[in-house]
Amino acid sequence: MRNNIIWALVLGFIQIPLAAGMAMILSRRPKGWKTLRTLYFLPNVISQVALAMMWLALYNAEFGIINSLLKAVGLENWTHNWLGEMETALPAVLIQQLFYIGYFMIIILAARMGIPDSYYEAAEIDGANILMQEIHITIPMLRAILITTMSLALAYGMRHFESTYLMTKGGPAHSTSVMGIILYRNLGALHYGKANAIGTILVIIGGTVIAFIRWFFGRKESASEATQ
């Protein structure tokens, strides 16, 4: 349960800000922005199994690219069995998932493209720089879509299963185990009662977390409107 909550919080409060930041950058149409948009979205059309196998190769303790690069720059002491040590296994699986911001980035970018350019032109005339424009125009106007994408990310985090099972199977010593893995194992052992209980608890916890997030941000939005 702890790992499920960690997954939900990391995806909701780290992955979504990364996706939003990249969407804001691409919305400014820098050179090559269409190519970057495609590259960021590309992992979402590749099999999760293939991606997990790729990261297994990258994290390989003996022949992985990550350890090889660390050795090449003289940081042998920083090399690890990334997926085989309790201290690094969960962060390693979490970090690889953070790279897949393309799905949420496209949603946020589409909403950002719908904001009239006249708002930014007026702000620029008033002396607002790009950062101020994003803070005072983009973020408030994307509030609803940001709450929606955060809710989706939290839901994905609570039901997370695939990459962790493929990369670590919940190990070492259950340090990366999530409720989806336990549910899968109970189904495989024909323990349908336990599997049903785990699924029910997962739905309740996930629904509670998502409802709280939506209530919290909805309350802040109502307070902001009342102040205005």
Image (cartoon, rainbow, N blue to C red):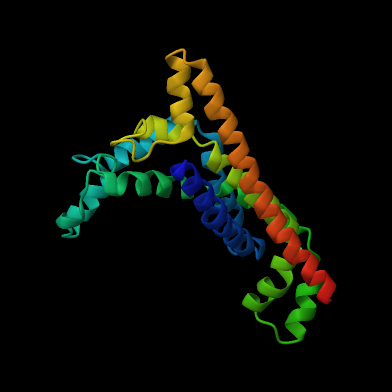
The residue depicted at 48 percent of the width and 17 percent of the height is: 187
Q: Nearer the viewer, residue 43 or 187?
A: 187
User: Horizontal placement of 220 versus 171: left or right?
Assistant: right
Q: Position of residue 39 (x, y in %)?
A: 53, 47
Give above or below for 174 relative to 194: below
The quarter of the picture where residue 128 lies is bottom right
Front residue (pair 163, 67): 163
Q: Residue furthest bottom?
A: 127
Q: From what the image shows, is residue 17 above or below residue 223?
A: above
Residue 211 in sight: yes
Q: Is residue 226 left or right of residue 16?
A: right
Seen from this angle, which residue lies furthest top?
A: 190
Position of residue 158 measured from the top left corner of the image (x, y, whole percent): 54, 40
Q: Position of residue 78 (x, y in %)?
A: 20, 56
Quadrant where the C terminus lies? bottom right
> Residue 201 falls in which quadrant of the image?
top right
Give the residue at x 69% y 66%: 139
Q: Nearer the viewer, residue 226 or 101?
A: 226
Residue 109 in view, yes or no: no
Tag count: 0
Identified at 42% across, 22% down, the residue is 185
- Residue 56, percent across and down? 33, 36
In the rendered image of this protein, does residue 73 appear above or below residue 35?
below
